[in-house]
């Protein structure tokens, strides 16, 4: 065992070092200069994100508990990009609300520990590491959801998140114990060789998927989503909707495709039912929302249903389409959340009616919002269309024609409510629209990056080819 | 291994614990009681791991180690939940679910 082995954990070590460095630096920074720490944190994390593209290795550590491959490094890079965008969007909020209470650095440290948990989650080689990753990624987010301690809804969001997360992890653990009982091991590699379809194994699989379903907010387990998104700070809501969901989707992919591959005939009907229920419930509930955060919460539930269409295909192509869709979804959803956040920080308004006449006062913001919603709905020129199209193709190539038909019906429903917001912004006139304002430079950079992502990812095909190549090698 | 007690009886107990926990989680109206119900679920899983390890695969310690990790993480989870509950209690002087809930539908 020499030092080079530890370089396999380079991403984790660097992130942990950044978090500890920020904690230590805070002690030496005088109280009126805390703002510089925000710049420092974002700079360090941006460098870390860039480094994530290089020097990646393949191997195993700790007897197979931790493993890393090119595909897993790609997962981590995707999560890095999403967190970087969330951080950039959060700066105005941190400056306005958090620095006043002298709690700016805690925000970054908690967010980075949560991301660290997700690294371990996607790198997990056995169920113990997976469980620790889930917990490390959830607990800091619960603290962050309750971050605005003076706000009652924030505490309510925190308590709802921690209880549903605790219940989910309890159910997951009970499922894992059943799989352990039938296979005698908790290592993914051992289990995939001995797995057989007995009743106990199937029950374990169902319970474990239920636990992960809480994190992805699939339909029978989605109750916490809207309340937590509404109550918690917007940057945390966007973090939950893209990063947390993305990491859980990745581990679900790894589990279903490698460990539970022998049981494919059993998990397919299960995923089928959940996908249909998730798409319909998410879309139908989104129709009646008046609050932008709740609206985006239900739209993100519906998007999770579309993701399942790629998972159900069960082929490497399906895997590639899911990863590609998650990447596009990150950019589109973060663009939408970024606009909501920019408006909320300056004016405190977050209802759809408040957005009436936005195009006349803030044309750039409303154009970004329009592009984001088009991408979420899947309208041809933007990336979201290609993401959905590939997902549907993957499901159809395995013969799930009726499911694809239901998916298309749902795209139509979702188009209706996305257009409601666009109508409010562009066509409606309002007595007192949101006045013109200028956001901070970081938030503008983040929105420009999101727009570039939405426009470029659909047209620039090497991205998809790269993902496809890695998935075929999985 | 306990003489005279087979794995079936022990697993029945853990399954009962699990479902009591789920039932309590859904029906209880007090935040602390909900927390206790969650602990029941986690402890059911811990006992499951240890029992399966001891009765079925006694030559390896994977289940027992898993149990220790669950206990440690559950403690952290409880601490965080109690911290948030205390913060909520400061604002509204109550830990009843009905008085806390402001966001619905």
Image: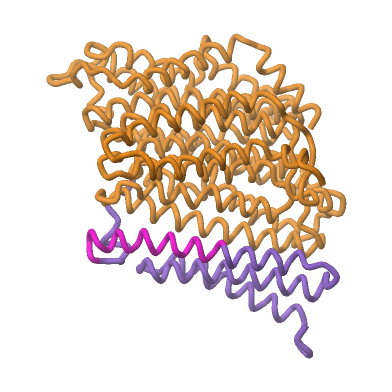
Chain colours: A orange, B purple
Left or right of A90 in this view: A247: right
Look at the picture and state if A114 lies above or below B64. Answer: above
Residue A427 visible in the shown view: yes
Residue that protrudes farthest toward the front in the picture = A28
Residue name at image x 72 percent, y 29 percent: A56
Look at the picture and state if A239 lies above or below A356. Answer: below
> Where is residue B88 drawn, in percent x and y?
29, 59
Residue name at image x 74 percent, y 59 percent: A179
Q: Which residues lie in the magenta part?
A: B73-93
The magenta stretch spans residue B89:
yes
> Could you tell me which quadrant the N terminus of chain B lies in?
bottom right
Residue A284 visible in the shown view: no
Residue name at image x 30 percent, y 35 percent: A291
Number of marks in picture: 0
Look at the picture and state if A188 lies above or below A182. Answer: above
The magenta stretch spans residue A15:
no
Left or right of B83 in this view: B52: right
**Which quadrant of the figure has residue A39?**
top left
> Where is residue A148 drawn, in percent x and y?
30, 46
> Where is residue A203 drawn, in percent x and y?
69, 59
**Which quadrant of the figure has residue B56?**
bottom right
> Where is residue B49 drawn, in percent x and y?
70, 68
**Which quadrant of the figure has residue B5?**
bottom right
Chief secondary structure of the magenta portion = helix
């Amino acid at each position: 065992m020499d030092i080079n082995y530890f370089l396999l954990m380079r991403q984790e070590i660097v992130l942990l070092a950044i978090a500890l460095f920020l904690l230590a630096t805070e002690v030496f920074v005088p109280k009126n200069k805390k703002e510089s720490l925000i710049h420092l944190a974002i700079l360090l994390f941006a460098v870390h994100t860039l480094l994530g593209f290089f020097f990646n290795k393949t191997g195993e550590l700790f007897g197979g508990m931790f493993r890393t491959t090119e595909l897993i490094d790609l997962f981590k890079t995707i999560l890095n990009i999403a967190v970087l965008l969330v951080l950039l969007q959060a700066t105005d909020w941190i400056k306005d609300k958090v620095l006043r209470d002298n709690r700016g650095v805690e925000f970054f440290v908690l967010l980075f520990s949560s991301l660290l948990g997700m690294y371990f989650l996607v790198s997990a080689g056995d169920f113990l590491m997976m469980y620790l990753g889930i917990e490390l990624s959830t607990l800091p987010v619960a603290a962050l959801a309750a971050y605005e301690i003076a706000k009652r809804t924030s505490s309510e969001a925190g308590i709802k998140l921690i209880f549903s997360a605790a219940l989910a992890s309890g159910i997951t653990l009970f499922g894992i114990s059943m799989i352990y009982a039938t296979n005698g091991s908790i290592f993914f590699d051992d289990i995939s060789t001995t797995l057989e379809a007995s009743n106990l194994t199937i029950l374990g699989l169902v319970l474990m998927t239920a636990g992960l379903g809480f994190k992805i907010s699939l339909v029978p387990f989605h109750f916490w989503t809207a309340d937590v998104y509404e109550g918690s700070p917007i940057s945390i809501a966007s973090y939950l909707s893209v990063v947390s969901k993305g990491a859980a989707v990745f581990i679900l992919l790894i589990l279903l495709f490698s460990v539970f591959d022998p049981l494919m005939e059993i998990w397919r009907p299960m995923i089928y039912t959940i996908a249909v229920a998730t798409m319909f419930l998410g879309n139908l509930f989104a129709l009646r929302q008046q609050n932008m955060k709740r609206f985006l919460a239900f739209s993100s539930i519906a998007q999770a249903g579309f993701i399942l269409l790629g998972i159900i295909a069960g082929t490497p192509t399906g895997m590639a389409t899911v990863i590609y869709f998650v990447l596009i979804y990150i950019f589109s959803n973060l663009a939408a959340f970024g606009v909501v956040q920019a408006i909320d920080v300056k004016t405190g308004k977050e209802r759809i009616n408040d957005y009436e006449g936005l195009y006349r006062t803030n044309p750039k913001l409303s154009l970004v919002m329009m592009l984001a919603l088009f991408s979420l709905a899947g309208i041809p020129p933007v990336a979201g269309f290609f993401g959905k199209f590939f997902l549907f193709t993957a499901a159809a190539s395995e013969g799930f024609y009726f499911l694809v038909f239901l998916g298309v019906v749902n795209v139509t429903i979702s188009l209706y409510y996305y257009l409601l917001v666009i109508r409010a912004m562009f066509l409606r006139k309002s007595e007192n629209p949101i006045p013109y304002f200028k956001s901070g430079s970081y938030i503008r950079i983040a929105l420009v990056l999101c727009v570039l992502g939405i426009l470029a990812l659909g047209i620039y095909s090497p991205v998809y080819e790269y993902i496809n190549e890695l998935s075929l090698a999985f | 291994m306990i003489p005279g007690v087979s794995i079936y009886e022990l697993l029945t107990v853990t399954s009962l614990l699990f479902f009591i926990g789920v039932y309590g989680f859904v029906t209880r109206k007090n935040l602390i009681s909900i927390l206790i119900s969650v602990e029941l679920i986690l402890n059911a899983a811990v006992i499951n791991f240890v029992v399966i390890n001891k009765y079925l695969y006694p030559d390896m310690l994977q289940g027992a180690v898993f149990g220790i990790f669950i206990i440690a993480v559950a403690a952290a989870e409880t601490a965080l939940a109690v911290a948030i509950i205390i913060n909520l209690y400061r604002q509204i002087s109550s830990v009843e679910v009905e008085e806390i809930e402001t966001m619905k539908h």
